Amino acid sequence: MSGAELGLALSVFLACTVEAVEALTIVLAVGSTRSWSSAIGGVGAAVLALAVIVAALGPAITSLPIDVLRVVIGGLLLIFGLQWLRKAILRSAGLKAKHDESQIYEEEAAAARAAGAKHDGFDGYAFTIAFKGVLLEGLEVAFIVLTFGANQHRVPLAAAAAGLAVLLVVLAGVAARAPLARVPENTLKFAVGVMLSSFGMFWGAEGAGASWPGGDAALLVIVPGVLIVAIAMSKTVAGTTDSGSIVPGAQMTSDTAEQARMGA
Amino acid sequence: MTRVRGLLLAVWEFVVGDDWRTAIGVALALGVTALVAAAGVTAWWVMPLAVLGLLALSIRRSARGPTR
């Protein structure tokens, strides 16, 4: 396995783990408070919808000329990656609330209990919330699998990495019977932001006509370079926040308000 | 029409997220890279510089106010 393929598998695995943990929390909350069968039905419907989206978009993406593919995919990955990285840096600097699966579980469970009486049999609330949760969290993973995989003609490898992540998270969730609050989600998001930004920058530049010194080996410099820059920015922001010099209007923002948007 | 508008808004939200300036910056950086490469000049350095600047500006904006 080449370095680029290893990076592909690792990026997809980490991104998928994060999204799967978040989806699991939502499914656990509505399943345990409303109806397991309806929640699992919602999960199945979302997985089916994701499969249809991947099946429809996959051939369209892979049929693009390689330079167009790389510049479009590189640009999109970079936009995604910079958003993940910005939020991860803000979290590590203490300017954004860290993702707390236990708290999110409690909020989702409280909303489910307040949603009205349960009916015997099919529960529309549990089905809909589970469906939306899995679909929204899964869309970004599907996009990452398709783009990373198509760009290197290794869609099966990307899909296998995603599948392994989902399997491990589901097994851990079944074993714990609780939200996976101990998964170092914020660290994983930091890593995913670094990987998406690095690969996006690499492929985007190549697609636009640039040649990296050393070819694929340039990734061995780009990935650590982005990591070092991100850590330095995090420490700088944290330091200036502590001294109160640059952020007089800064406010702690919460992840829970962003549940409708994917992961990052 | 409302459904089409809703779909387009969802795609915009999915791709661009809450920081449209970064998305525009990435597109511009790729355009500059293409122009520099087309002129026969080494162009790989454009994207790292752009990423550094875009990330710093994005964090600065967020640190000055609530994330929208």
Image: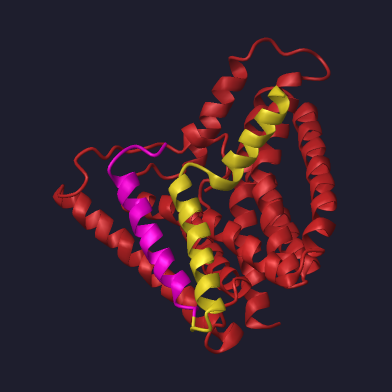
Chain colours: A red, B yellow
Q: Is residue A177 something one can see in this rendering?
A: no
Seen as rendered, the residue at the extreme front is B39
Q: Please determine whether, in this image, residue A46 is positioned above or below residue A106.
A: below
Considering the whole magenta stretch, tell me its main secondary structure. helix
In the rendered image, is residue A205 in sight? yes
Residue nearer the viewer, A240 or A162: A240
Q: Does A93 lie within the magenta span?
A: no
- Which one is in front, A135 or B34? B34
Residue at (60% x, 17% y) in the render: A113
Residue at the spot x=53%, y=58% of the render? B27
- Residue A106 left/right relative to A57: left
Q: Residue A42: horizontal and vertical position, in percent?
A: 77, 32
On the picture, is B50 further left or further right than A193?
left
Q: Which residue is drawn at 32% across and 46% down?
A: B61
* Residue B4 vertical position relative to residue A143 in the rendered view, above or below: above
Which range of residues does the magenta coloring cover? B43-68
Give the percent coordinates (x, y) of residue A154.
Answer: 77, 71
